[in-house]
Amino acid sequence: MIELQALTKTYGGRPVVDEVSARFARGTLTAIVGSSGSGKTTLLRMINRLVEPTSGRVLIDGQDAGRIPEVSLRQGIGYVIQGYGLFPHWTAARNIGVVPTLLGWPEARIAARVTELLQMLQLDPAEIAGRYPHQLSGGQAQRIGVARALAARPDVLLMDEPFGALDPLIRRQAQRDLAQIRRQLGTTIVLVTHDMNEALYLGDAIAVMRHGRFEQFDTPDRIIRAPATAFVADLVGETGRALRLLALHPVGSLSRAGEAEGEPVDVAASLSDALAEMIWTGRDRLPVTDAQGQRLGIVTREDILARGRE
Amino acid sequence: MSVPRIDRLSAVMALPLLASPALTAFGFRPNRIAPPQPRTWAEAIGWPLTGALLAGLVLLAVALLLLRRPGMRLLLLAGALAALVVLLGRGAVLLLEQAAPAARVSPGAGFWLAAGTLLLLLVDAFARMRPGPAARAALLACAVAGVAVLLGSGTLAGLSVAAEFRVRADAFHRATADHLVLAFGSFLAALVFGLPTGLAIQRHPGLRGPVLNLLTLIQTIPSIALFGILIVPLAWVAAHVPGAADAGIKGIGTAPALIALFLYSLLPIVANTVAGLDAVPRAVTEAARGMGMTEARRLWWIDLPLTLPVILAAARIVLVQNIGLATVGALIGSGGYGTFIFQGIGQTATDLILLGVIPTVALAFLTSSIMDLLIALSGGQPQ
């Protein structure tokens, strides 16, 4: 768990982060959304002390981060930045293994961990491990950046606009991959983004930040349903709110017994995806299956529409 | 009818190559300071060998016009150059056989024209092979070995520069040692001092302007003036600081020359270190810190390796510059090849001047080539 206590950073008397207090629960992904200059990156960098707070504290699992030596604090926290910052003179494998190397892992263990991470991120170790950063595509480089951050199994992962440099198509895929791997990891993730859609898609909790303060810190559902300020409402957007809500919930939440014809929908797919499928194929009910293709029941149009009206 | 495509560079170069035998091949002097008298190839090596030379040159020109494979051209040209140099040595010996012991023979315009043309074509052939670092290292090794064999075999013993060398072999070896100490010693000192300085002013931007301006100012002082400026304080130090004179510090000699060369070396090394560190991407620095590297780790693992090509480029500039400037040090008694140059100028003895100039140029060329190789190996661009 990460706890911020009246965390403040001022530059020349002007507060960039202004007495922010919040708790990010263990194993959750908190997305901090804001425009540039809102203080979101500064806030993130105070967690691994790349920026020293002017006042206030960061507690990580109850321990004051300010009292842990900088270097060991950072070695225990994964860090992914926009542009990735891969070391250009090192191979992908050596980049990934940097924190384990700093921690003094034996070489065989590092090599095994690198292979494991590459496989988890769907990269072929034989092909990618020996490549230099300039030989990688944008999507590959991004994944190497994530693998490097995860290498030493950190309890906390900080991500600063991790998808900002990717083109839209690859960005969507990278977001899907992150959503998937984070369920296997149980890591507490703090992700900074300026993209509300990304935050809604990935976040268990969302903090909307403006002028160094949290305007609203809430679940995605509440952010859409009950924006606390005009600024939050503006970020979420007036139109399509019902569809956005539906996008937050999986088909499984409305699955019921019954029979239906045609192509089934996955239990983990969102309600908005199911609705789109109904509109497209002219059906009012879809069979629901799990990842193994096992039939679980059906989802109906009435149920989805009712959920959207709640 | 198909005409074989003619190599354009060869077509241009064939002209000086074929014209060269018409010029003076040798300069003959009754003694070492007399003005040279022209001697043709025929006068030196006789008509049969001259005929062979002429036929060889014509054949070579034709072969070059038609032959396009760079590897073949390279071998052919290397062979031709070697043959030309052997003929030069032979001619010198034959001319001296008929003359008084004080007589001297040196290469004339005709030889230089032919040799220069061959060398240009050789370099061109090599460039056309698009050589990698390994090939360049191999060629360099071959060239050094070739020159060593040539000098060791006594083929050129008849030439006047060799005669100057024979009388001064000991002085030459001392000069070589002095020159190396001056050029490389000052470079190493500048490296030891300049790298940390570059690092410091890159990390503390307030120092950047003053330090770089000061070093630029030093760079603008003419070398002879800087040597002169240093004489006064060093003489004072030698006279007043106990032990300084025993350590070899004097107003003239090696100490001021080393210090002057050291000062000249600082600007390229400091400026390139700063530029190289500036060029390390921000995201890379940020990531290195975020991963939990200490300052020292980051320096050794990230900053220095990424800056190495730029620092090597500075080292190349500094070494070539120092090898040249070290000759001037001879004026204040620091030794080195400059000694022969200034003695030669004083005695109007061209051969003696050449005895200083040739090794200086060869050393500079060799150093520059080796540094280029190192830069290429470190991932940078050779200049």
Image (cartoon, grey):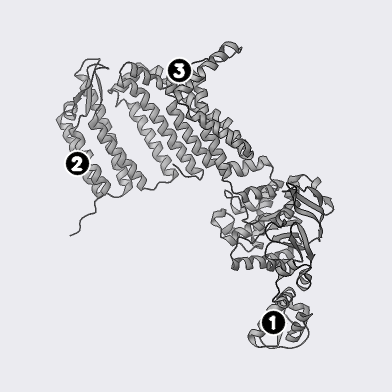
- At label 1, the amino acid type is Leu
Residue holding disc 2: B58
The answer to whether residue A59 is seen in the rendering is: no
Task: Name above or below for residue A249 compared with residue B268.
Answer: below
Rendered image: mark on residue B332: 3
Q: Which element is circle 2 on? A: helix
The answer to whether residue A73 is seen in the rendering is: yes
Relative horizontal placement of residue A95, taking residue B84 as reference (left or right): right
Residue A255 in the image, given as x and y percentages of width and height: 77, 81
Residue depicted at 74% across the width and 58% down the height: A211
Task: Name above or below for residue B118 compared with residue B244.
Answer: below
Rendered image: mark on residue A141: none
Relative horizontal placement of residue A99, taking residue B348 as reference (left or right): right
Query: For this rendering, which residue is in front, A8 or B16?
Result: A8
Judging from the image, mark 3 belongs to the subunit labelled B
Nearer the viewer's eye, disc 2 or disc 1? 1
Q: Quadrant of residue B100?
A: top left
Q: Which element is circle 1 on? A: helix
Structural distance between the alpha carbons of marks 2 and 1? 88 Å
Residue depicted at 43% across the width and 21% down the height: B336
Task: Name above or below for residue A61 compared with residue B325.
Answer: below
Query: For this rendering, which residue is in front, A154 or A67?
Result: A67
Task: Name above or below for residue B136 compared with residue B4.
Answer: above
Residue depicted at 30% across the width and 18% down the height: B348
Residue holding disc 1: A275
Structural distance between the alpha carbons of marks 2 and 3? 51 Å
Residue B342 in the image, given as x and y percentages of width and height: 37, 19
Image quarter (top left, top right, bottom left or bottom right) of the C terminus of chain A: bottom right
Tell me the crowding category of disc 3: few under 14, some 14 to 19, or many 20 or more residues within 10 angstroms, Cα based: some
Q: Do dots 3 and 1 share one subunit?
A: no
